[in-house]
Image (cartoon, rainbow, N blue to C red):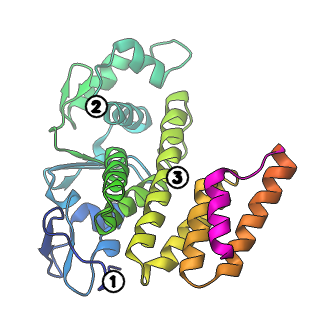
Amino acid sequence: MVGPHVLPNLLHDLVVGVGPCDESTLAGDLLRHDRSFVGDCGWHYVGVALERAKVQLCGKLALELDGERVEERLPGRQGRLLFAFLAANRNRTLTRAQLLDALWPDGRDGGLAPLLSKLRRTVPLAGHRLDLPAAAWVDIEAAADGVHRAESAIAQGDFHRAWGPSQVAMFISRRVFLPGEESAWIDDVRRRLGELQLRALEAYAQAGLGIGGTELAAAVRAGRDLTRREPYRESGHRLLMSALAREGNTAEALRVYDQLRIRLHDDLGAAPSTPTQELHKQLLR
């Protein structure tokens, strides 16, 4: 929930009043992100609710066009895969060969032409391209944009402005892209989302550190998540150490450093980097 210390930046954040019946269909039903942005003060970050075309590829596949959910109209499993491939690459010019490789990696044509024809009955296509409005909301694009905006805000020292976008990126990227499906192109997207997840966690931890207050606990959680996922990623350890120290748990922060030092020495024959060692020295003062 948005705490009272997290204030909207009226120069950068779009905020509106929300009534009990005004929650967006996609946020409340598909992504369930609205609960993370609506606070007692009656405002939330708006983005997905304003778009007329919305696509969710992470978690359960979902598609909303002009306010209507239409994913059940997609033509079977192959049609859903084709739609997902087109949506994930909607800003690229795709060839017939690329579509065939995405659906049938063995090189055969299992019926691309009729599949495209059936898909066209549900979604607009322009040749081999998904013809959605430029402003259409696609979850994996929103995750990448959220990370970029959060990192940019942090670089400018605006931690409140980084808080919301980093959460959006975390929520989306933690969900599995096309669960139950396996393909080389799907693996590539999942790897990119995994990288976005790490960057989003770091941005969220940095935002929490910058905001302080009750957000320090969230920064600690994000730091612990980072160190579990990437035990050799020193930036995650530094964030966790800093958050623990800000909470007053300096001894625990020193223990995190010692665990990292031992792991690097035993596994890699290396020592912590200079920035990590400098942080350790500051904690000892």
Q: Is residue 165 above or below residue 189?
A: below
Residue, x 71% and y 72% (percent of image)? 254
Residue, x 81% and y 44% (percent of image)? 268
Q: CA distance from mark 3 to mark 2?
A: 24 Å
Give the amino acid type for the residue marked by disc 3 in the picture.
Answer: Leu
Of labels 1 and 2, the one closer to you? 1
Q: What residue did someone put label 1 on?
A: 3
Give the amino acid type for the residue marked by disc 2 in the picture.
Answer: Arg
Which numbered circle lies on residue 198? 3
Q: CA distance from mark 1 to mark 2?
A: 37 Å
Q: Nearer the viewer, residue 7 or 18?
A: 7
Q: What residue did someone put label 2 on?
A: 90
| 209 sits to left or right of 63 | right
Circle 1 SS class:
loop
Q: Which residues are drawn in magenta? A: 269-285
Question: Is residue 272 covered in magenta?
Answer: yes
